[in-house]
Amino acid sequence: MPPRSQPTARQVRLGTELRRLRDAAGLTARQVAVFLGSTSAQMSQMEAGIAGVSEERVRRLAAHYTCTDQELIDALVAMATDRTRGWWEQYREALPPVFLDLAELEHHAKFIEEISTAHVPGLLQTEDYARAVIAYWRPELPESELAPRVEHRMRRKAVLGTTPYTVVLHEPVLRTRVADRQAARAQLDVVLEQSEAPGVTVRVIPFDVDGFAGASAELLYAGGRVPALDTAQRDTPQGSAFMDAAAQLLSMRTLFRKVEAVSLDPSRSRDYIHRLAKEL
């Protein structure tokens, strides 16, 4: 199998986890390459996600690394053997890879938790809202590039109803009109509609709540097949960042629980959004 020229974030994550198992076993890539009858270069490609890895090799490596976490091993095997070509693959030539990586992350997630303090999150956005946000930040985009970005964002909603989704919204998210009054009202209606859908939980943090200092706490947290394979995603000045180190994941889980703790419960949150909608 030829090396991949552009591995996906999921493929890179598999390689990262195999490297972590090797590091925990106290072995060098050269030592493992000798064990496999391979080379250090091939080991580097595998651990970078550039080269694929079979189920047999994942299990052989896990045994060599004395990994006894069978659930983790099975989850890594599932990642290695997954041949899913999801809807996002249609956009591979049209959009930057991070768009596809995010859709794939959401598709495989066992649950999704999100904090939004600036905009309505993509999974809840209307088409008009999404178009206004994307066009504002990327005004140079021609319609031929703007349209697939909006379409991709709309298609990401496929996970709602199949994947448990909890989102905490700070009040400015609901009050800011990224387009006009009509679009703002339509957006609040969609948030309310989704808040009553099975598997979707919407919570609001009002302006006047005490104990909230997280105005920059934007976060998407996707649960993996096992907790060690969870992933956090945050936007940075350099672009979208995926985090998967154990300390990072613990920090992001703690952040979400802290923010969730000061939010209104789902019922009171719906009432609050209703009141905001009436003001429009």
Image: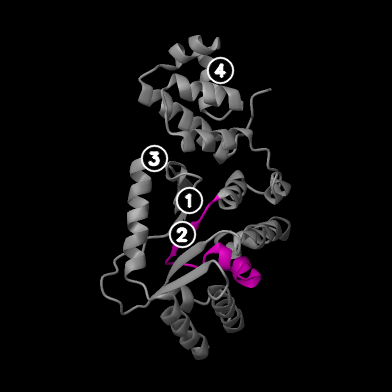
Residue at x-position 59% and y-position 62%: 134
Q: Are marks 1 and 2 in contact (CB under 8 Å)?
A: yes
Q: Secondary structure at mark 2?
A: strand
Considering only vertical position in the picture, is 141 above or below 187? above
Residue at the spot of label 3: 245
Outermost residue to the left: 211
Q: Earlier in the sequence, mark 1 or mark 3?
A: 1
Residue 238 in sight here: no
Residue 135 in sight here: yes
Residue 190 is drawn in which quadrant?
bottom right
Residue at the spot of label 1: 223
Dot in front, 1 or 3:
1
- Judge the density around disc 4: few (<14), some (14-19), many (≥20) Cα neighbours within 10 Å: some
Residue at the spot of label 2: 113
Residue at the spot of label 4: 42
Extent of the magenta region = 109-133
The picture places residue 135, in percent across and down from the top left corner, at: 61, 64
